């Protein structure tokens, strides 16, 4: 048995698997549109299951659509170590967001097999359902239900823009993957480590290939509905109009002004804006828009988020407003002992690292609530992500996978020098 499993990480195989996965939902501009529980997502799941089967991993999925591939350990009853991320993408997503953590985990388990290492604890590779929240809002549905932060009942009624519900798509998933056993929803996990592209410019700027993630900034998301009155574009007088679009814009501009901070730490985003009836000669009667609000300081996030409804009500007059908070997540810091294990694994591989906070959200947020968790970042070109131009290098992806592999050895092997 070769204890240096990381030496068996194959950069070319890892890269080729990314290119193969990018075929599922490939867009003309070179990105991917592989949204949660779509046919493209199903195809990616089947490809992952097949790759896993070729190295002896056994697959199951839970009632929330989370997919697990298990490497057996000598202690079958021990709580597993988990690693993974998400395979779903934004509609104009890139080839690496999410899928890198899944393929780096697969690469690590293949390295274990090729090194002849059987861990004491089972190691489970996981692909969380609907991390992105683009088709069904909010995101991180699978990991939040797995961790008990949300219920299955709360996600199944959520519908996409076509009126298809999560429940309908989960049933379609169970039929399409009828060969997969169903595993329990929410199980004991010994530790969780997620590899992900940084989605920011720091590692590339510092010339480093690996970051040890210190934590994740807080995020609150809202759905706002502004209700006015449809009327004729030619005959209805301005004084009588209740124009939902102008009222929504006034609310958004008021929030942007209120949330503007000289330190440029507030992240206020209206990414979705739906006008009804969306007809050129009809004064809009209704507008639904999303709010994604983030800040590294939870007290600021609480203060600003608590102002959303009042600002909307005040500035949307004479229209009516309904504000629904979809998700609330405070800033978190990963446990030092997990960060130390990741850093020591990198040192062993002679890979320099940097401690770096995550401005983006990740499923690790919910695993952090149920077990010792951590994250490994690798750079992406110019920090670009949630964009079809998202890019990374085979070398950086492999370095991250090597650190992940060495970390998993420490977490799952009996004779490893560390305990979480
Ligand atoms: O929005 C996020 O932070 C994540 O990339 N879905
Ligand atoms: Mn992601
Ligand atoms: Mn993303």
Image (cartoon, rainbow, N blue to C red):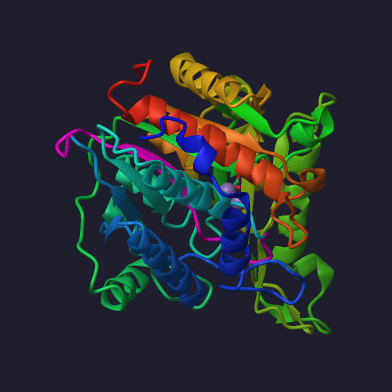
Residue appearing at x 23%, y 41% in the figure: 187
Question: In the image, residue 39 lies at what x, y percent?
Answer: 47, 77
Residue 255 sits in quarter = top right
Magenta highlight on residue 84: yes
Residue appearing at x 69%, y 74% in the figure: 27
Q: Which residues are magenta?
A: 75-94
Residue 371 seen in render: no
409 lies left or right of 17: left
Residue appearing at x 46%, y 29% in the figure: 407
Residue 389 sits in quarter = bottom right
Question: In the image, residue 102 lies at what x, y percent?
Answer: 48, 51
16 lies left or right of 80: right
Magenta highlight on residue 392: no
Residue nearer the viewer, 389 or 285: 389
Residue nearer the viewer, 46 or 403: 403
Position of residue 263 relative to residue 362, above or below, is above
């Amino acid at each position: 048995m070769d204890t240096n499993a990381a030496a068996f990480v194959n950069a070319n195989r890892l890269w080729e698997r990314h290119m193969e996965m990018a075929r599922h939902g490939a867009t003309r501009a070179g990105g991917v549109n592989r949204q949660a529980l779509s046919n493209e997502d199903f195809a990616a799941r089947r490809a992952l299951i097949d790759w896993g089967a070729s190295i002896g991993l056994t697959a199951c999925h839970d009632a929330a659509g989370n997919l697990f591939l298990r490497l057996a350990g000598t202690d079958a009853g021990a709580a597993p170590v988990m690693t993974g991320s998400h395979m779903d993408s934004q509609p104009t997503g890139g080839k690496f967001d999410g899928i890198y953590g899944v393929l780096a985990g697969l690469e690590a388990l293949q390295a274990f097999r090729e090194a002849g290492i059987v861990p004491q604890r089972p190691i489970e590779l996981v692909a969380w359902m609907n991390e992105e929240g683009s088709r069904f809002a909010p995101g991180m549905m699978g990991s939040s239900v797995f961790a008990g932060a949300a219920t299955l009942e709360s996600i199944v009624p959520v519908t996409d823009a076509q009126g298809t519900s999560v429940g309908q798509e989960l049933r379609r998933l169970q039929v399409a993957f009828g060969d997969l056993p169903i595993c329990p929803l929410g199980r004991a996990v010994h530790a969780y480590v997620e590899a992900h592209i940084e989605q920011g410019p720091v590692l590339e700027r510092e010339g480093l290939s690996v970051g040890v993630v210190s934590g994740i900034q807080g995020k609150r998301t809202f759905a706002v509905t502004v209700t006015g009155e449809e009327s004729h574009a030619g005959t209805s007088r301005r004084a009588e109009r209740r124009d939902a679009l102008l009222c929504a814009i006034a609310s958004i501009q008021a929030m942007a002004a209120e949330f503007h901070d000289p330190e440029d730490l507030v992240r206020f985003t209206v990414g979705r804006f739906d006008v009804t009836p969306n007809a050129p000669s009809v004064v809009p009667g209704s507008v639904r828009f999303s709010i994604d609000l983030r800040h590294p300081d939870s007290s600021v996030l609480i203060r600003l988020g608590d102002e959303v409804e009042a600002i909307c009500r005040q500035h949307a007059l004479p229209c009516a407003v309904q504000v629904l908070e979809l998700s609330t997540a405070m800033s978190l810091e990963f446990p030092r002992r997990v960060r130390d294990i990741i850093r020591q694994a990198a040192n062993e591989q002679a890979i320099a690292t940097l401690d770096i906070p995550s401005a983006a959200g990740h499923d690790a947020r919910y695993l952090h609530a149920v077990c010792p968790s951590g994250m490994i970042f690798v750079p992406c070109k110019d920090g670009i992500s949630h964009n079809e131009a998202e890019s990374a290098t085979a070398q950086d992806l492999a370095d991250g996978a090597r650190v992940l592999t060495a970390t998993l050895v420490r977490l799952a092997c009996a004779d490893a020098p560390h305990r979480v």
